[in-house]
Image (cartoon, rainbow, N blue to C red):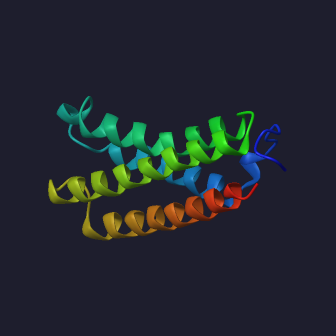
Amino acid sequence: MGSKEKVIEDVEGLDVFKVAHQLVLQVYRLTSSFPKEELYGLTSQMRRASSSVVMNLVEGANRLTKREYRHFVGIARGSVGEVRYQLMLAKDLGFLKLEECELLRGDYKRVGQMLTKLGQSLAGD
C-alpha cells in the first residue's frame, strides 16, 4: 500500500491495542485509590496518558495515509514514556507498591516495543 492510499486497519484486532486497552483499565483501577487531592493532578495525568496510547492508535488507524498513521503511533509511543514515568512517581510518592509499579512499567515497555514494530511496518512504502 502506498503512503497516499487510505489506511484501513482493524485497530481493535491488533495485539498492541488489546494490551494497551487492558493497561488503561488497570491504571483507572489503581488510581482510584490515590489520595483525593491528586484527582486533578497525578490521577488525571495518568489516566489521560494511558488512554492517549490507545486513542492515538485509533486516530492514526482512521487517518488517510500510512504516514499519518505512523505519526500517531509515534505520539502513542510518547504517551507510553509518560505513563512509565508517572508510575515511577506514584511509587516514589507511596501511592503504588513496588511490585505494581514494576509490573506495569514492564507491561508498558512491551507496549512501547510493539508500537515501535508497528511504526516500522508503516514506514515502508
**Residue 47 percent location from the top left of the image:** 40, 39
Left or right of residue 63: residue 50: left
Q: Is residue 25 visible?
A: no
Determine which quarter of the picture holds residue 56: top right
Image vertical order of residue 3 relative to residue 80, above or below: above
Residue drawn 64% across the image and 52% down it: 17
Among all residues in the image, which is located at the extreme top? Answer: 40
Quadrant where the image shows the C terminus: bottom right
In depth, the one of 53 and 98 nearer the eye is: 53
Left or right of residue 8: residue 36: left
Image vertical order of residue 112 relative to residue 40, above or below: below
Left or right of residue 48: residue 24: right
Q: Is residue 58 visible?
A: yes
Residue drawn 72% across the image and 59% down it: 124
**Residue 41 percent location from the top left of the image:** 23, 34
In depth, the one of 24 and 72 nearer the eye is: 72
Residue drawn 79% across the image and 41% down it: 7
Determine which quarter of the picture holds residue 105: bottom left
Could you tell me how many numbered marks the image carries?
0
Residue drawn 63% across the image and 35% down it: 59
